[in-house]
Image: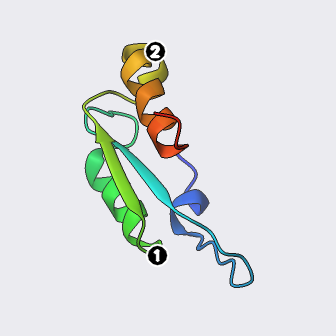
Amino acid sequence: AEPVAPYETPLIFPELEIFFFFLLFLQDRVIPIETQRRMHAGFPAGRTYQLDTDHGPFFSAPNEFARLLGGIAGRD
């Protein structure tokens, strides 16, 4: 059994200016790409990045993942 609330509970922060970045992992078997895209669709527009990795890119592609995060942080 999996908890449902994280997938169905909207997050609303009207008083904050939030920048959204979405990381999609194409080979993820824990959260399939279709579910990731559905989760992403519930948020305001933001930048989307995808890696052809599994659920743990920090293990399966650490250099590529670090470069992506560095780029998002403006440190590339």
Badge 2 crowding class, 10 Å Cα cut-off, few under 14, some 14 to 19, many 20 or more, is few
Can see residue 29? yes
Q: Position of residue 19 (x, y in %)?
A: 56, 65
Per the rendering, the mark at residue 59 is 2
| SS state under label 1 | loop
Frontmost residue, 28 versus 60 = 60
Vertical relation: 65 (above or below) 40: above
* Quarter of image, res 50: top left
The residue shown at (46%, 15%) is: 59
Frontmost residue, 22 versus 5 = 22
Can see residue 1? no
Vertical relation: 62 (above or below) 29: above
Quarter of the picture containing the C terminus is top left
Q: Position of residue 8 (x, y in %)?
A: 53, 68
The residue that disc 1 covers is: 44
Badge 1 crowding class, 10 Å Cα cut-off, few under 14, some 14 to 19, many 20 or more, is few
